[in-house]
Amino acid sequence: MPALTTLSPASLLPVAIDRGEGATLFDTDGNAYADLYGGHAVALLGQGHPRWVAALSDQARTLSFVSTVAPVPLRDRAAQALCDFTEMHTAFLVNSGAEANEAALKIARKAMGRDVIVAFEAGFHGRTMACLGVTAAGSYRSQHDPVHGTTRFVPYGDADALAAALDEDVAAVLLEPIQGIAGVIEPPAGFLTACRRLCDEVGALLIVDEIQTGIGRCGRAMQWHAERACAPDVCTVGKSLGSGFPVAAMLCTEAVAATASPGEHGSTFGGGPLACAVVLAVLETIADEDLLTRGRALEAIARERGAAIDSVGTVRGAGCLLGVVLDRPARPVAQALVRAGFLTGTAADPHCLRLCPPAIMPPATLHAFFDALAATTTTGVRT
């Protein structure tokens, strides 16, 4: 009988990871790797953070699971803390970013009584069917045609193109405040605010996908806070929210929440006690350990060190979501860096190394990474 395998993406790393500690991962042979990828921008607190571990273990001993059929005070506390942190009104807790985006699309279409979503070229919002309908990145969408819903795609950062795409058939505009998978692409200054204004002109909602950028990842609570005039009607968070535990949320204004009826949205495991305990621990740790400031400090190091390396064209992004743009293909460089003890990611931009380090990473580790990057690119890794 053939061995059973899981249906999962092909492994990008030539090493098998066995354990982790802080910002370091160890393979099955005991070799150490500085984790500058953070499990697809998830591990904001790194591996085995004491507060995260204590919250999970204490809650497991107290109440491991009860569904949303029963009120749980812990769930209320987690939802309130999340709304306070993000400056939103209502939280719907789910298990993954794609599930949060599905809920966002669902509530937007119903609330507005319209079908069309305007999204952006090179954007990524998940691999479930409705999310594929609004995802333009790579071949994810084309592999599963026909996709759900009507979507108009416009160039990211082009306010004029967005204005031309908007009319009274549009339910919502969906955007990433920094496009992650595309290559850590930042929008022009004022673009997020322009999106808000243009949505208001046609009565459409603004959905901000902060699955990758939110919950402290970019050195602020939410990346949309960089332009507060763009305050969304709906936003989605995940990844860093659980720092390794599967939890995400759709957040919305009071007006949007009022369009949903009890039971219309649901998730068996969404808002479970373990997830809620972790959410509280993550948000408290971000505040108590000043991780927003620490994330911005890591960004400053990356920009300074990157500017001094000939092979680096620019460093994009914010906080602990950074794109190091090289003068050569990034994938061979990333592979060489694994051999030097550093794990990084790549992006749709073939010249971009995507860095998503834990906010708890020691600055010395980031300096060591740039030393290794300079040494690697000086030796002529180009193919």
Image (cartoon, rainbow, N blue to C red):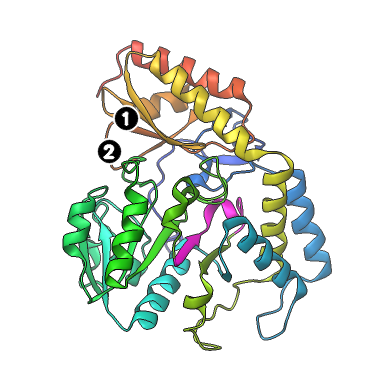
Quarter of the rendering occupied by the C terminus: top left
Q: Horizontally, is 327 left or right of 128 in the view?
A: left
State the image coordinates of residue 293 (x, y, percent, origin top left): 62, 35
The stretch in magenta equals 233-245
Q: Nearer the viewer, residue 304 or 325?
A: 304
Closer to viewer: mark 1 or mark 2: 2
Q: Is residue 243 magenta?
A: yes
Q: Nearer the viewer, residue 82 or 84?
A: 84
| Secondary structure of the residue carrying numbered label 1 | helix
Please report the residue visible at 79 percent of the width from the left and 71 percent of the height from the top: 63
Q: Horizontally, is 79 left or right of 380 in the view?
A: right
Question: Which quadrant holds residue 362?
Answer: top right
Q: Which residue is under mark 1?
A: 330
Q: Which residue is under mark 2?
A: 349
State the image coordinates of residue 192 (x, y, percent, origin top left): 36, 51
Q: CA distance from mark 1 to mark 2?
A: 9 Å
Q: Are marks 1 and 2 in contact (CB under 8 Å)?
A: yes
Q: Amino acid at mark 1?
A: Ala
